[in-house]
Image: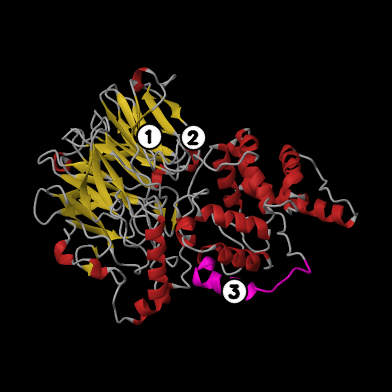
């Protein structure tokens, strides 16, 4: 099955596209299905845009200029922990331990607050993209690309962690968008996304979805489809509905499509990938695989290429009352855009319709240069907000005083 | 920045020392032997004098982007890139060692293509490089930038091995970009690309 179209671009692409799709179907679900040109239109063939350099080493505190960060009046940011190379998702233990996953250095960190300083322990090494961490019943769950691990009784055994138990391993091995953000829902299931194995392609049914699994791995089911790459989600404490960020495709230009903030009002909804972007833009290559009318549109368009990642509802008591139940979204920042966008935290208030948004923290981007990249946020028991930064290899803490 | 300038200066001293050594008919780099230079000299056992490899499937390091070298050494150290030879070596390196070694090799002049090689088939490699937008990240000169390695003048057998490893998921890189770009390309296309790129100055 290949696409029928009259556009000159697709006609030119057709043989390569069909060959790639055929090769992919022969190779099975473990292989990405995109053509080698990856959706780049001819007019962008000479574009100098390239993925941002990843950071694998932690910066010293002196190289982290937090005085550049702008916050609303009364808010303050400080470095809370350092030496956390490639710090990504943040999870909280029931005894106060902060766990941090990494995408590129194979490590999981545990941080214990000792009052005047933080004690950092590396509790796992040599894992494959252990980006995702979540905590339940004394155990830390860690998501690699192709499996979910559980480390039992971890807060009592930080210096001598037990061997991880494999909870679930029925996951594709594809690298593109294969790293995971994970979290436990109010239903007690662990939500595990499987990203598209490409920028833009017709993904196998095993991909471009959020699935949920029982904590013991005994059952798994697809919760949402048409999701390109979500690296952040949370549940509204008022309604228990799932909200998630989704990163839009690349190579459609500077200003489309927008990254999405989506609201799942039920299981098994389709959010449009690969045929529909930001609710109303049919994909130029794959638009005839579906209709925007059959895709749930985003509640908020966060902006093209901002790379909206970690997101949590603010449920603490420290910030001013208007912040309660707002979402705080970490924007990791763009690469596929002529003028950089993102590199900041934004808030989203869904208590009224339409929702309102605003900038919460910015300054990681100075001109066209960035020195830090926010990845995830986590509300602490005292109501302060932790922020992870994989460029600086650090955790920050944002507090408020009247 | 002082440190970086210092390193670049030390690199240029090393370059001068190598040039002198080569002119004197001595293939081993000599010069003011600081600890980093001593470590770098041990790299030469496989990566060649001056970072110009003459060993099968071992890359030349000279003229690679410093950031690329930093990332690869860190990946070996953190067990994220598998190599029986490199992982034990990198395991002993501190962050500072990694950055200084990377700056050292980045400052060395890149290898020139060897003369007298069969240049037939380079046109096919050039066509494939354009069709797959290699220059978009690796630059029009194929000198590389940041995390993207220099391809120009690299050993042909190493380029072929690296591309096969990326395509086949043995070398995942950072975000799967190379796995995605090379997906579905047959060995003969990778061979043509490797041949073309290895011949560039």
Q: Give the residue drawn at x 69%, y 48%.
A: B104
Q: Give the residue drawn at x 15%, y 47%.
A: A267
- Mark 2 residue crowding within 10 angstroms, few (<14) / some (14–19) / many (20+): some
The mark total stands at 3
Q: Which residue is mark 1?
A: A100
Residue B197 in picture, x, y percent from top left: 63, 66
The quarter of the image holding the C terminus of chain A is top left
Callout in the foreground (1, 3): 3
Q: What SS does tag 3 mark?
A: helix
Q: Which residue is mark 2?
A: A126
Residue A254 in picture, x, y percent from top left: 35, 67
Residue B68 in picture, x, y percent from top left: 58, 51
Q: CA distance from mark 2 to mark 1?
A: 15 Å
Q: Are marks 3 and 2 in contact (CB under 8 Å)?
A: no
Most distant residue in the top direction: A156
Task: Using the image, name the chain to which the residue with label 1 belongs.
Answer: A
Q: Which residue is mark 3?
A: B124
Q: Nearer the viewer, residue A213 or A356?
A: A213
Inspect this view and state whether residue A127 appears: yes
């Amino acid at each position: 099955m290949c696409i029928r179209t009259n556009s000159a671009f697709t006609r030119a692409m057709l043989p390569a596209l069909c060959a790639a799709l055929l090769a992919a179907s022969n190779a099975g679900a473990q292989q990405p299905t995109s053509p080698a040109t990856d959706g780049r239109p001819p007019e962008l063939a000479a574009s100098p845009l390239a993925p941002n350099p990843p950071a694998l080493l932690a910066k010293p505190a002196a190289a982290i200029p937090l005085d550049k960060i702008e916050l609303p009046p009364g808010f303050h940011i400080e470095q809370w922990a350092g030496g956390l190379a490639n710090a990504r998702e943040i999870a909280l233990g029931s005894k106060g331990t902060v766990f941090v996953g990494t995408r590129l250095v194979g490590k999981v960190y545990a941080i214990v607050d000792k009052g005047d300083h933080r004690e950092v322990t590396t509790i796992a090494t040599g894992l494959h993209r252990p980006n995702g961490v979540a905590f339940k019943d004394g155990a830390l769950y860690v998501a690699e690309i192709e499996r979910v691990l559980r480390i039992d009784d971890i807060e009592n055994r930080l210096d001598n962690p037990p061997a991880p138990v494999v909870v679930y391993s029925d996951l594709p091995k594809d690298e593109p968008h294969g790293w995971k953000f994970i979290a436990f829902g109010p239903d007690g299931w662990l939500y595990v996304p499987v990203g598209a194995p490409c920028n833009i392609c017709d993904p196998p049914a095993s991909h471009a979805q959020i699935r949920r699994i029982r904590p013991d791995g005994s059952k798994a089911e697809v919760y949402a489809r048409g999701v390109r790459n979500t690296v952040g989600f949370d549940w509204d404490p008022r309604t228990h509905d799932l909200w998630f960020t989704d990163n839009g495709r690349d190579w459609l230009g500077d200003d489309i499509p927008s990254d999405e903030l989506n609201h799942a009002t039920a299981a098994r909804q389709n959010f449009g990938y690969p045929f529909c972007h930001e609710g109303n833009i049919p994909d130029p290559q794959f638009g005839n695989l579906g209709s925007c009318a059959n895709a749930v549109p985003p509640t908020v368009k966060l902006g093209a290429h901002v790379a909206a990642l970690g997101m949590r509802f603010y449920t603490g008591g420290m910030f001013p009352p208007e912040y309660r139940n707002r979402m705080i979204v970490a924007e990791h920042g763009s690469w596929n855009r002529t003028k950089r966008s993102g590199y900041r935290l934004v808030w989203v208030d869904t208590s009224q319709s339409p929702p309102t948004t605003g900038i919460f923290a910015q300054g990681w981007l100075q001109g066209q240069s960035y020195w830090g990249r926010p990845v995830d946020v986590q509300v602490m028991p005292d109501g302060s907000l932790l922020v992870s930064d994989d460029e600086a290899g650090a955790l920050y803490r944002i507090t408020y005083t009247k | 920045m002082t440190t970086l300038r210092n390193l670049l200066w030390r690199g240029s001293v090393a370059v001068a020392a190598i040039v002198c050594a080569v002119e004197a008919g001595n293939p081993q780099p000599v010069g003011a032997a600081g600890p980093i230079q001593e470590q770098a000299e041990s790299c030469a056992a496989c990566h060649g004098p001056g970072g110009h490899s003459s060993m099968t499937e071992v890359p030349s390091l000279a003229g690679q982007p410093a950031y690329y070298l930093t990332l690869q050494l860190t990946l070996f150290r953190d067990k994220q890139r598998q190599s029986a030879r490199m992982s034990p070596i990198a395991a002993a390196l501190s962050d500072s060692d990694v950055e200084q070694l990377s700056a050292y090799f980045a400052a060395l002049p890149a290898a020139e293509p060897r003369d007298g090689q069969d240049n037939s088939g380079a046109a096919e490699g050039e066509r494939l490089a354009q069709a797959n937008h290699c220059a978009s990240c690796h630059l029009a000169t194929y000198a590389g930038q940041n995390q993207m390695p220099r391809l120009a003048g690299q050993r042909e057998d190493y380029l072929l091995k690296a591309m096969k490893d990326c395509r086949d998921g043995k070398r995942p890189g950072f975000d799967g970009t190379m796995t995605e770009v090379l997906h579905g390309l047959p060995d003969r296309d990778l061979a043509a690309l490797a041949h073309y790129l290895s011949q560039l100055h």
